[in-house]
Amino acid sequence: MTHLGLYFKYIIDKRKVHKLGVDQSTEPTTLFSPGRSDLNSLKMAWKTSGLMQMCRFLLLVILFLPHEMTSSVLTVNGKTENYILDTELGFEESLKCAVQNHTREEELLWYRGEGRVDLKSGNKINSSSVCVTSISENDNGITFTCKLQKNQSVSISVVLNVTFPPLLSGNDLQTAEEGNDVKLVCNVKSNPQAQMTWYKDGSILNLEKDHHQIQQTSEYLQLSITKVKKSDNGTYSCTAITFTERKTKDFHLIVKDKAVTIPIEPIVAACIVVFLTLCFGLLARRKRIMKVSKYSNLKGHLNKKFLEFLSWLCG
């Protein structure tokens, strides 16, 4: 008999003893009394049995797990991790996203940046492709992301790295008066980033302290000239150099003579003073003016009467 069988026999005999003690307390009963070693064996058997039951339970849980909990993996062009795709101007790139370890049909989504790509109905299930045609400099740095429709946290991304030569732009003609400040801004787009330099009339620009200042970012090269002089006249060239190409754009600066300006404020002030002086003079002499005016009127009236009298005499 196994240790587990002995243990259960011990339990049964113990229950029988309890029953006999109640009903027939006078009848002697023979009991099975296991030793210490038997008890230890029984404990080990019980623990082993409990461990086996736990293992069976875990196995059943695993077997009956829903299929959706099985992890699916996405790949783009066979790669399982996010990656950078090197390309060039005018190229065409195809990105194919596929579901690995799927147990049912999975719908896929494509995003270009933050915008969702419109896919045809036959280009969504388990495998989906997008095509980027006529790649331009504006596609540089754009991220394409493939996601599971049911669980969009499962995704994989591809970043386009478009190599293209420097593209330069800016206001190529500026006119300034002598003594004014001028800024020449050369806008640049390039990948990889270009090395930028300013030239003047075909030679590298000699920077003068407190007169020239250069500021450069990944998007522009700016030349600031403080209080331009006649000697600043000329052609300034913005040059961008990469490991493949060299591009140049010319900026023409024309410095004019400083215009002679008439001081308007003093003239206006003088006019006001003259006007007020005349007003005060007229007010001061108004009585005399009125008398002269009255005398002039009387004289004119008398002259008129005298002329009438002479006309009467002659008539």
Image: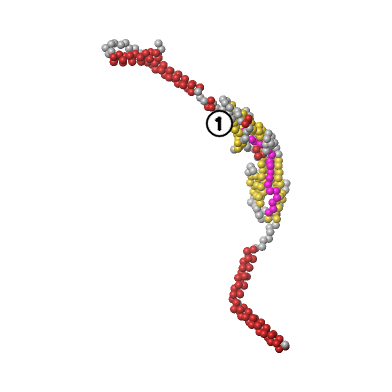
Q: Quadrant of residue 101?
A: top right
The total of numbered circles placed on residues is: 1
In this rendering, is residue 219 above or below 58?
below
As drawn, which residue projects farthest toward the bottom?
Answer: 313
From the top left corner, tell me how far across and down residue 254 is, in percent. 71, 53
Residue at x 62%, y 70% (from the top left corner): 275
The quadrant in which the N terminus is found is top left
Q: Of helix, strand and loop, which mostly describes the magenta segment?
A: strand
Q: Amino acid at mark 1?
A: Lys
Taking the spot 65% from the left edge, 38% from the top edge, the residue there is 139
Asked whether residue 143 is in view, the answer is no
According to the image, label 1 marks what residue? 150
Q: Please report the bounds of the magenta region as a residue range.
A: 148-176
- Front residue of 156 and 186: 156
Query: What residue is drawn where x is 64% and y is 51%?
Result: 210
The 10 Å Cα crowd at callout 1, few under 14, some 14 to 19, many 20 or more, is few
Can the viewer see residue 246? yes
**What element does badge 1 sit on?**
loop
